[in-house]
Image (cartoon, grey):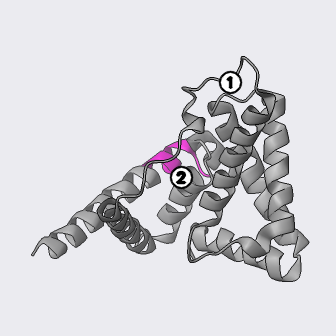
């Protein structure tokens, strides 16, 4: 099961069963990422923390509104965070409100062709990832889906740093070959 599906399943568990362990796992994964995202959007540390906490409370209270057919759990949570940030800025109505702030502008409409291309690329990557040997898939997951640095992966897995880097490099080589081969089949 891929990570996107895994987190979507956890949200469903929260919605259906009020599963506290599923919520705790979602909280541990998403709260720091939401805070970082909000700080990138210009929120100060305390405001970002407050909004991230509010988003996680919303997850607990309104998990039943999540539709895994429409978006991933991360897309749903980050959209809530973005909207909460906009609401916070509007409530302030102070000189701090910058009409040029990118978070205040509506998102561009989705280009259907681009969306389909992105979904196709995502599916190709997912399939290519499933073909990797377990030891390579593990370090790729830790690096790119859990956001760990090479040193943190080394610490967590007990592997030498050079081995971690080699496995990631080998995995990328295999992924590139698999995706290029798959793309070539589509062209033919």
Furthest toward the front, the residue is 93
Residue bearing the label numbered 1: 97
Q: Quadrant of residue 7?
A: bottom right
- The label on residue 144 is 2
Mark toward the start of the polypeptide (1 vs 2): 1
Residue 169 in the image, given as x and y percentages of width and height = 39, 50
Please give the range of residues in magenta: 159-166
Q: Is residue 179 left or right of residue 93?
A: left
On the question of residue 171 being in view, the answer is yes
Q: Does residue 90 show up magenta in the picture?
A: no
> Looking at this view, is 89 or 26 the one in front?
89
Q: Is mark 1 on a helix, strand or loop?
A: loop
The mark total stands at: 2
Quarter containing the C terminus: bottom left
Looking at the image, which is closer to me, 169 or 119?
A: 119
From the top left corner, tell me how far across and down residue 134 is, in percent.
51, 70
Q: Are discs 1 and 2 less than 8 Å apart at CB?
A: no
Q: Residue at x 73, y 72 (%)?
A: 65
Q: Position of residue 47 (x, y in %)?
A: 81, 33
Q: Where is residue 95 in the image (x, y as percent from the top left)?
A: 72, 17
């Amino acid at each position: 099961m891929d990570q996107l599906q895994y987190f979507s399943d956890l949200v469903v568990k929260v919605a259906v069963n009020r599963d506290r362990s599923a919520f705790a796992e979602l909280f541990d994964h998403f709260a720091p990422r939401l805070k970082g995202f909000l700080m990138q959007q210009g929120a100060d540390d305390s405001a970002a923390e407050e909004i991230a906490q509010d988003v996680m409370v919303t997850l607990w209270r309104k998990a039943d509104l999540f539709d895994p057919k429409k978006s991933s759990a991360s897309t749903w949570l980050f959209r809530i965070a973005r909207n909460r940030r906009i609401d916070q800025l509007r409530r302030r109505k102070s000189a701090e409100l910058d009409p040029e702030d990118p978070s205040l502008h509506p998102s561009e409409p989705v280009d259907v062709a681009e969306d389909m291309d992105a979904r196709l690329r995502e599916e190709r990557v997912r399939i290519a990832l499933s073909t990797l040997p377990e030891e390579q898939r593990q370090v790729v997951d830790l690096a790119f889906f859990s956001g760990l640095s090479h040193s943190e992966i080394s610490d967590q897995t007990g592997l030498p740093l050079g081995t971690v880097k080699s496995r990631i490099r080998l995995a990328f080589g295999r992924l590139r070959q698999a995706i290029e081969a798959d793309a070539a089949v589509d062209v033919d």
